[in-house]
Image (tube, rainbow, N blue to C red):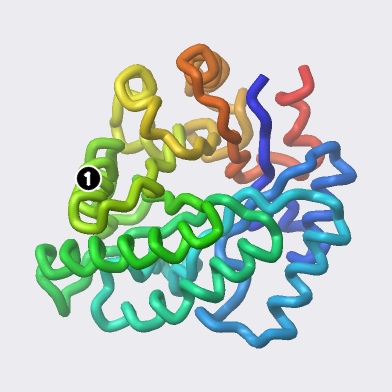
């Protein structure tokens, strides 16, 4: 059976962030993931220590962590390809990997970033290859993988399909010879963007390094929409995927009640 990990940046938002790992454990989960949990690329040591303690004290495993992605509520979707903020991304690399090393985290999501008016797409893409190569080299120090994710709902985000993300990964691996860059297949984002999720699973399962799920429409828990998530998870398992499945949805009710689908 595939194992679930709870994204505590979108679930358990009824609670302060540092209380969410413990709430996930009480709910029966032993693994959590987070978007970047701080306001800055390089937070104070005390903030990092408090986050690490919250994970340790809860008795859960941190399985995924995003690199700093800018102001997500304000519309930012990563700094990887953003020339004016590339320095922040690079400053964040050692911080993120350092947290991962302390907590045994093996996957880091590097959101690509929106197109910006101040740079040409080709310039942004060239920078992204360089930054993803640097991220992969940093992650390799602790045996971790860097994830590249197609995203929906962001008008200027250029990676919409699995093919878009895989093309970026191919360029990074050709330039840097880094094997530890993989596809984050969020089945919700792929479906909303019009990708053929069944074909992505059939053709690229060996390149999927992490999976996340939500239903559509609404991005709520499985069973609230029309996506064939159970069948797709079965296809992933049958195809040999042994990784984690991130619960990255917006609960249509309370977080605890939204877990009913997974225990039926």
Query: In front: 238, or 18?
Result: 238
Instruction: Name which residue lies at 71% across and 24% down.
Output: 261
Query: In front: 205, or 190?
Result: 205
Quadrant of the image containing the C terminus = top right
Query: In front: 258, or 169?
Result: 169
Q: Residues within 10 Å of mark 1 (few under 14, many from 20)?
A: some
Seen in the picture, residue 89 relative to 140 is either above or below; the reply is: below
Seen in the picture, residue 232 relative to 192 is either above or below; the reply is: above
Q: Quadrant of residue 1?
A: top right
| Residue 24 in view of the camera | yes
| Residue 218 in view of the camera | no
Instruction: Name which residue lies at 60% across and 35% down.
Output: 244
Q: Quadrant of residue 128?
A: bottom left
**Spot occupied by residue 147 in the image (x, y as percentages of width and height):** 42, 50
Which residue is labeled 1 in the image? 170
SS for tag 1? helix
Instruction: Name which residue lies at 75% across and 33% down.
Output: 259
Q: Quadrant of residue 9?
A: bottom right
Residue 197 lies left or right of residue 34; in this view the side is left
Residue 46 lies left or right of residue 236; in this view the side is right
**Spot occupied by residue 225 in the image (x, y as percentages of width and height):** 54, 26
Residue 61 lies left or right of residue 109; in this view the side is right
Seen in the picture, residue 72 relative to 144 is either above or below; the reply is: below
**Spot occupied by residue 91 in the image (x, y as percentages of width and height):** 44, 81
**Spot occupied by residue 71 in the image (x, y as percentages of width and height):** 47, 73
Residue 246 lies left or right of residue 140; in this view the side is right
Instruction: Name which residue lies at 79% across and 39% down.
Output: 29
Task: Give the tally of numbered discs.
Answer: 1
């Amino acid at each position: 059976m595939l194992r679930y990990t709870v994204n505590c940046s979108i679930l358990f938002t009824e609670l302060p962030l540092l209380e969410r790992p413990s709430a996930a454990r009480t709910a029966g989960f032993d693994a959590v993931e987070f978007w970047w949990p701080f306001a800055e690329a390089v937070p104070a040591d005390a903030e990092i220590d408090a986050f690490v303690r919250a994970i340790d004290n809860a008795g859960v495993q941190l399985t995924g962590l995003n690199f700093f992605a800018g102001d997500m509520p304000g519309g930012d979707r990563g700094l990887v390809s953003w020339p004016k903020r590339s320095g922040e991304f690079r400053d964040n690399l050692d911080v993120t990997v350092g947290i991962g090393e302390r907590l045994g985290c093996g996957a880091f999501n590097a959101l690509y970033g929106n197109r910006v008016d101040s740079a040409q797409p080709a310039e942004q893409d060239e920078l992204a290859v360089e930054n993803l190569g640097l991220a992969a080299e940093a992650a390799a120090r602790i045996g971790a993988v860097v994830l590249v994710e197609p995203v929906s709902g962001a008008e200027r985000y250029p990676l919409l399909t699995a093919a878009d993300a895989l093309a970026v990964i191919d360029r990074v691996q050709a330039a840097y010879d880094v094997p530890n860059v993989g596809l984050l297949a969020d089945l919700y984002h792929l479906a909303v963007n019009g990708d053929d999720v069944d074909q992505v699973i059939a053709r690229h399962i060996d390149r999927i390094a992490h999976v996340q799920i939500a239903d559509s429409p609404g991005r709520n828990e499985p069973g609230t929409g029309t996506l064939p998530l159970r069948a797709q998870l079965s296809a992933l398992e049958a195809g040999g995927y042994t990784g984690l499945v991130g619960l990255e949805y917006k609960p249509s009710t309370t977080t605890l009640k939204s877990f009913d689908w997974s225990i039926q």
